[in-house]
């Protein structure tokens, strides 16, 4: 897919810091393959915690971390982490590139939950089949934590992973609040920051149809990966790392 992207920043010769933001029902360890590969190439890489509580406050949390870094930054988000970086990157001139990995890239006013695609398993199945719902202290009115049910996690979320590994990841998943998916995006950093989009054809959570539409309006550099799942960053970290490297190369 060809797209016209915002102009990349001039090369500074300084290696950027790469910051990776995980998505829902995952944690920072989902980036282990990419962290290892990029560190071997001499990059400073940080895979940081994403609270998974509310898009606005989650983005503020990440934004606060980013403000402690000096020099150019390449910021990548997986899944719901894409919505977070879309908001967290605003007004930080050090952020030179955004990378969306099977992710949502909302426009102002859109919610992450509205962007999974009409053909997503999250839209074609009732909540009772998808989630275990758990109340949590301090939750906004009506909000609950969501855990993906085992069958959905293994067969739809991480469908290209060995079943034993997918089951282990299901057992150790982090819950995400319904507020994370229902909070409207305040910003759309992809309108002014060059972006890259990695789209797995086998993604059943945020579907390729939805991702292609978001990538097109963001004028992203697009890589279409044949196969994979919503967890291609775990099953094929080399392919994901290659796209992050493209973004790195644009700012060096």
Image (spheres, grey):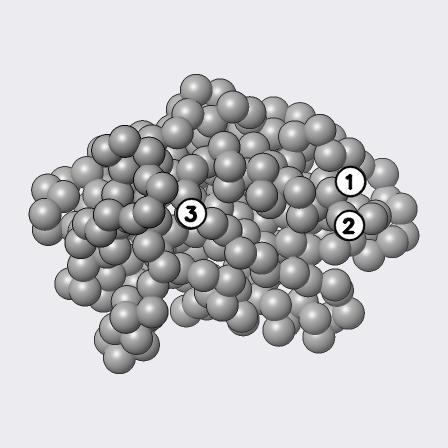
Name the residue: 30% across, 48% down. Answer: 136
Asked which quadrant contains residue 27, the reply is bottom left
Ranked by sequence position, the earlier of labels 1 and 2 is: 2
Residue 79 visible in this rendered orientation of the protein: no
Residue 135 is situated, as x and y percent measured from the top left of the image, at 24, 47
Element at label 1? loop
Q: Name the residue at the bottom extreme.
A: 164
Q: CA distance from mark 2 to mark 3?
A: 22 Å
Residue 74 is situated, as x and y percent measured from the top left of the image, at 69, 48
Q: CA distance from mark 1 to mark 2?
A: 8 Å
Badge 2 crowding class, 10 Å Cα cut-off, few under 14, some 14 to 19, many 20 or more, is few
For residue 94, the mark is 1
Residue 46 is situated, as x and y percent measured from the top left of the image, at 65, 60
Residue that mark 2 sits on: 69
Disc 1 and disc 2 in contact, CB within 8 angstroms: yes
Residue 89 is situated, as x and y percent measured from the top left of the image, at 64, 36
Task: Name the mark nearer the viewer: 1 or 2.
Answer: 2
Ranked by sequence position, the earlier of labels 1 and 3 is: 3
Residue that mark 3 sits on: 52
């Amino acid at each position: 897919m060809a797209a016209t992207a915002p102009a990349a920043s001039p090369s500074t010769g300084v290696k950027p810091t790469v910051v990776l933001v995980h998505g829902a029902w995952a944690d920072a360890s989902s980036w282990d393959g990419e962290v290892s590969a990029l560190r071997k190439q001499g990059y400073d890489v940080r895979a940081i915690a994403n609270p998974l509580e509310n898009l606005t406050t989650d983005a503020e949390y990440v934004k606060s971390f980013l403000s402690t870094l000096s020099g150019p930054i390449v910021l990548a988000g997986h899944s719901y982490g894409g919505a977070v970086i879309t908001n967290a990157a605003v007004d930080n001139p050090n952020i030179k590139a955004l990378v969306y990995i099977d992710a949502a890239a909302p426009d102002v006013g859109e919610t992450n939950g509205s962007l999974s695609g009409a053909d997503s398993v999250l839209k074609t199945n009732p909540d009772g089949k998808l989630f275990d719902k758990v109340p949590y202290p301090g939750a906004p009115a009506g909000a609950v934590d969501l855990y993906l049910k085992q069958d959905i996690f293994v067969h739809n979320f991480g469908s290209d992973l060995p079943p034993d590994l997918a089951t282990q990841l299901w057992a150790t998943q982090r819950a995400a609040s319904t507020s994370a998916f229902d909070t409207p995006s305040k910003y759309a950093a992809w309108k002014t920051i060059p972006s890259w989009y990695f789209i797995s054809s086998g993604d059943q959570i945020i579907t390729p149809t939805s991702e292609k539409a978001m990538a097109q309006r963001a004028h992203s550099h697009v890589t279409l990966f044949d196969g994979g799942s919503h967890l291609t960053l775990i099953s094929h970290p080399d392919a994901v790392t290659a796209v992050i490297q493209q973004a790195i190369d644009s700012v060096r």
